[in-house]
Amino acid sequence: MKILMMTNTYTPFVGGVSRSVRTFAAECRKMGHRVLVVAPVFEGMPESEKDVIRVPAVQHFNGSDFSVVLPIPGFLSSKLETFKPDVVHSHYPFMLGSTAVRAASRFNCPLVFTYHTMYEHYVHYVPAEAERMREFVINLATGYCNLCDRVLAPSQSVAQMLRKRGVKTAVDILPTGVYVREFEHGDGAGFRRKYGIPQDALVAGYVGRLAPEKNLSFLGQSVAAFAAQEKRGHFLVVGSGPSEKEIRAIFAEKRIDGRLHLTGALHDKALIDAYHAMDIFLFASKTETQGLVLMEAMAANVPVVALDAPAVREVVNDQVNGYLVQIEQSREFADAINRVAGLPPAELKNLRDAARKTAESFSMQSCAEKLVSAYQEVLRHKRTGPRDEMLWSQAAEQVKAEWEIVANLAEAARTTLRRSD
């Protein structure tokens, strides 16, 4: 099978979508399928990549760490014509997501879309009126789902949300998996030495992009409150992004900045070692569709304290494999960290064992097998002819794809404006 994956984020960009594309592509290739990834140019990307096409892009859009692709007519045409995909898998509903619709129509093959992200929580990156833009993004993503042959949701809560918003396309639940065995062993002590963290420190950790939608102001305040009480308390932050300055300012204000350790983005063994340097893993985001880092932490036997949120509670079972904080208050979150830190050894072991068992249920291999099964299913029920027989039924499929893209944009705008009146 020839699989075309199209994504707006990819390595070296650090994030759940980038990691999902990279790992699923690798697993599909192991199973004998050919995967071609189309992604924007990013600073620091590898000089040589097999079966990856990089599209010219504007770096650091609006002060973020995202790249925005440039519309260059014909840039991909000959490359995709040579590849001739059997299935197109889109990982975003806009930018290269629009290109994915065109490619699926051009090659008359199924279009699969993974709803990785709650896009309405990212409107702060766009200079526009927030509430109206939020509505537009929701309508745009919902309409995009209905252009596809199959939608993949990383969690049950996302699948329910999509159906509630009016998605008619069949939705399968398919999380991004974790290489559980890879996270089993790491050099936590060596990592602490490298970054100047005392061996007897009680280390609370976070892994992910340092961005406003991750609720890091709240998390920073909560960990600072914990560290102010616990003299051995340190905060290990793995990642990069615009919220780094805010986290630094919080710890500087409390005069405990010596107990804050920011490593930047880490990969492979360095990332695994970072998890093993942590005593407790923390997570405060309310915008996740899955929370992949939660499963990575659990695979590394690190207890989790997380703010209660829909996708999070599908992974974290309160007081079984971690702790869920019900109220978004720094004092409550700090108290939960203290509770885990003070657990007797036997109870802590039970928490770790349950976390490990949870991670094993999300193994990358089994998730990749489910993805290939989803591809095979849509291929068995492949549409013939234009995607919408009621419109432009005699038109060329590429013209049809343009119509669907523009119609979806127009409908999203019309619905948003009508609700705003």
Image: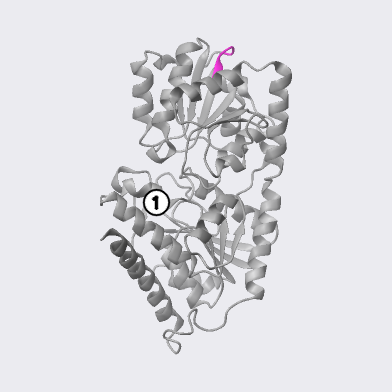
Q: Is residue 75 magenta?
A: no
Q: Nearer the viewer, residue 44 or 326?
A: 326
The magenta-colored residue range is: 199-203
- Whether residue 165 is visible here, answered yes or no, is yes
In percent of width and height, residue 204 lies at 53, 23
**Colouring mode (rainbow / by chain / secondary structure / one colour):** one colour
Q: Main secondary structure of the magenta part?
A: loop
Assign the C terminus to one quadrant of the image: bottom left
Assign the N terminus to one quadrant of the image: bottom right
SS class, disc 1: helix
In percent of width and height, residue 31 lies at 70, 58
Q: Which residue is mark 1?
A: 120
Q: 218 left or right of 410?
A: right
Q: Nearer the viewer, residue 147 or 395?
A: 147
Above or below 81: residue 162: above
In percent of width and height, residue 138 lies at 40, 57
Task: Please identify the quarter of the rendering in which residue 295 is found.
Answer: top right
Q: Residue furthest bottom?
A: 394
In percent of width and height, residue 293 lies at 56, 38
